[in-house]
Amino acid sequence: MKIAILGYGVEGKAIENYFKTHPYDDPSKSLHVEPTDLELTVFDKFDANNLPDLSSFDVIFRSPSVRPPVQPDAFELLKNPSLIPEKPVWTSSTRYFYNLVNRNRIIGITGTKGKGTTCSIATALLKNLGYRVHLVGNIGTPAITALDNIIAEPDTDYFVVYEMSSFQLWDLEKSPHVAAVLRISPDHLDIHRDFNDYVNAKSNIARHQVPGDYCIYYVNNADSVKTAEYSDGDLIPYPLVENREKLDQLLDNLQIPGAHNRENAEAALEVVAAALKMTLDQLINAHHDQLTQALHDFKALPHRIQFVRELNQVSYYDDNYSSALPATEVAIKTFADKPVVLIAGGKDRHLDLTNHKKVFFESPNVKKVILIGELKQQLAEGVRPEKYDFADSLAEAVEKARFEAEKFDSAVVLMSPGAASFDMFENFGDRGDKFQTIVRELK
């Protein structure tokens, strides 16, 4: 069997390593091919809009950002079975994973921002309740690398918590037993055709759910509600409006800052309750002490409003995971009672920047914005010069932010770019690590 791997990032490398020592299995077709009979070909550099000739391959694993091929819809196939392609079969690490793992043990979480934190809190809660948990997906651990351990698990002793991006959901034909849909807002429009395409991809987390499944959704976002309504399972909205006393007392144990993180923790609690076939009230009553401990001990994920240090009464925070405006808006609101100097900007992903400018330059607590990256000139257009400054490097941005912040009492330097990192850095982690290094070296 000839397998093509499109893309050689984290998932592409994981797929290659897996099939060097594992068979290719497709239970739906009773297909089992030993690794000695697999021929792997990696395509590292290619134009996603002009793919190489793949007609000789039996199976193609696409990287997350490669658009799935357009297939005839089911009605057309029924009318004309000859339209069914014999090969190549297009798949992904996520699709392959879902074919081999009991979906009743899978918790899938998506949204534009907050996925990683919600997944991590849900994982911490389940572990404190005594379950083995496999945290995989967009959070950085390719799901295929966990298959050996998962398949070896007894069916009732584990859960998979899967952080799912729009790219991983794009062509998914199975939905998790428990799905959570957080806030959805425009993102990745340099890859998706438009916002509708992005939301449609996200919707696969709920689209294939069946009665008996659960979909937790953010009730204050129209696109989250729209996505959840595809589900045939039980729909569970959050945040709750009534009967919040016990819930709020529990959430008070959370040590990470921001109202958004209380919402993320609430979503995680709802996810855990659904996974355990309980109501939220039943979960809190039955496991109050374990839940309290898990929330209290939870630490902020790297580069998500992460405290770095204090120097000269200025606190420095790394929010470099912020690659879209909603995350930056949330981060600014987290410090609503403090003067903030914001470092923002990054790669141009062809978004309308009107709302970016409003949030950056009209938030009352933001005293100055230091602009970096491809977007800096566009962001500054039409803005009063005293509101911003440019920096050509991250070190320069930190120095300028420090100078401005030290004019105020108890100020915050917040790096929350609201844009992708790839114009200047390898990824958001590289951007955040470099920011932290520069800040820690300040004298």
Image (cartoon, helix red, strand yellow):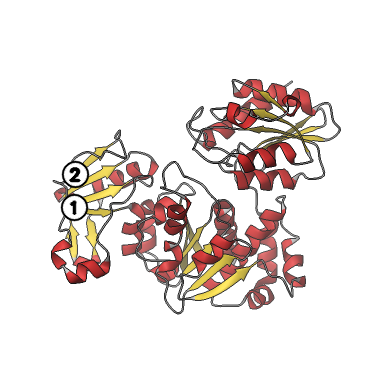
Mark positioned earlier in the residue sequence (2 or 1): 2
Amino acid identity at mark 2: Leu
In this rendering, position of residue 442 left or right of residue 323: right
Q: Looking at the image, can residue 307 be seen?
A: no
Which image quadrant for residue 329? top right
**Real-space Cα distance between discs 2 and 1?**
8 Å
Circle 1 packing at 10 Å, graded few (<14), some (14-19), many (20+), is some
Residue at point 75%, 71% (across, down): 246
Q: Quadrant of the C terminus?
A: top right
Q: How many marks?
A: 2
- Residue 333 or 229: which is nearer the viewer? 229
Task: Single out the residue that lies furthest toward the front.
Answer: 382
Task: Single out the residue that lies furthest toward the right.
Answer: 409
- Residue 293 or 263: which is nearer the viewer? 263
Does 144 sit above or below residue 406? Answer: below
Residue at point 39%, 69% (across, down): 208
Amino acid identity at mark 1: Pro
Does 279 sit above or below residue 361? Answer: below
Q: Position of residue 300 (x, y in %)?
A: 64, 48
Residue at point 47%, 75% (across, down): 213
Q: Position of residue 78 (x, y in %)?
A: 20, 71
Q: Secondary structure at mark 1?
A: loop
Which mark is on residue 88? 1
> Given contact means CB atoms under 8 Å apart, are the residues at marks 2 and 1 in contact?
yes
Q: Looking at the image, can residue 73 be seen?
A: yes
Which mark is on residue 41? none
Circle 2 packing at 10 Å, graded few (<14), some (14-19), many (20+), is some
Q: Secondary structure at mark 2?
A: loop
Q: Position of residue 162 (x, y in %)?
A: 46, 58
Q: Which residue is mark 2?
A: 54
- Residue 56 or 148: which is nearer the viewer? 56
Q: Position of residue 55 (x, y in %)?
A: 15, 46
